[in-house]
Amino acid sequence: QVQLVESGGGLVQAGGSLRLSCAASGTIFRINAMGWYRQAPGKQRELVAAVSSGGITNYADSVKGRSTISRDNAKKAVYLQMNSLKPEDTAVYYCYGLFGANEYWGQGTQVTVSS
């Protein structure tokens, strides 16, 4: 059974930084993409950043220039470095994995940015 486990969330002041980590466990034959989504209270879940197996990255406009996604296929892990955090970045951040034709989600990690 494939599982995604996130870590690295927390409370940070505006302007600060956080690094989120996500590691997949279980039998995975092919990693097509991994990434991060977030969901703020009362809002829909939205893409933050994703990286394909070939290293192509995609960022939401709201985090471009402030965030960097990276991956380690050998460790089946993906990371999100977020800098210059803003209160509007407050949300639950979910790790996402597209392994073969199947999608997997982590349980989420809370990121709270205080003003």
Image (spheres, helix red, strand yellow):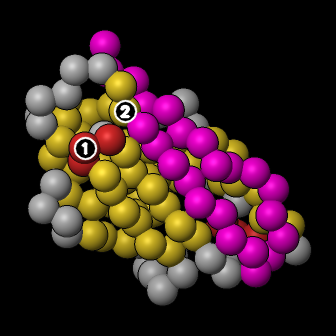
Is residue 21 shown in magenta?
A: yes
Residue at the (37%, 45%) spot, across then down: 77
Q: Give amino acid for label 2.
A: Ala
Q: Give amino acid for label 1.
A: Ala
Task: Where is residue 44? Give x, y as percent.
Answer: 52, 50
Q: Which residue is mark 1?
A: 74
Can you say which quadrant of the picture contains the C terminus?
bottom right
Q: Which residue is mark 2?
A: 24
Residue at the (60%, 42%) spot, across then down: 7
104 vs 27, left or right, is right
> Disc 1 on helix, strand or loop?
helix
Magenta range is: 1-23
Q: Quadrant of residue 58?
A: bottom left
Separation (CA) of disc 1 from disc 2: 11 Å
Q: Earlier in the sequence, mark 1 or mark 2?
A: 2
Task: Where is residue 3? Give x, y as percent.
Answer: 39, 24
Q: Which mark is residue 45?
A: none
Residue 43 seen in the current view:
no
Residue at the (84%, 70%) spot, across then down: 13
Mark 2, residues whose alpha carbon is within 10 Å: few (<14), some, or many (≥20)?
Answer: many
Q: Is residue 83 above or below residue 96?
A: below
106 vs 82, left or right, is left
Task: Where is residue 59? Give x, y as percent.
Answer: 37, 72
Q: Main secondary structure of the magenta part?
A: strand
Mark 1, residues whose alpha carbon is within 10 Å: few (<14), some, or many (≥20)?
Answer: few
Nearer the observer: mark 1 or 2; the answer is: 1
Residue at the (65%, 63%) spot, across then down: 18
- Numbered-mark total: 2
Q: Is residue 55 above or below residue 20?
A: below
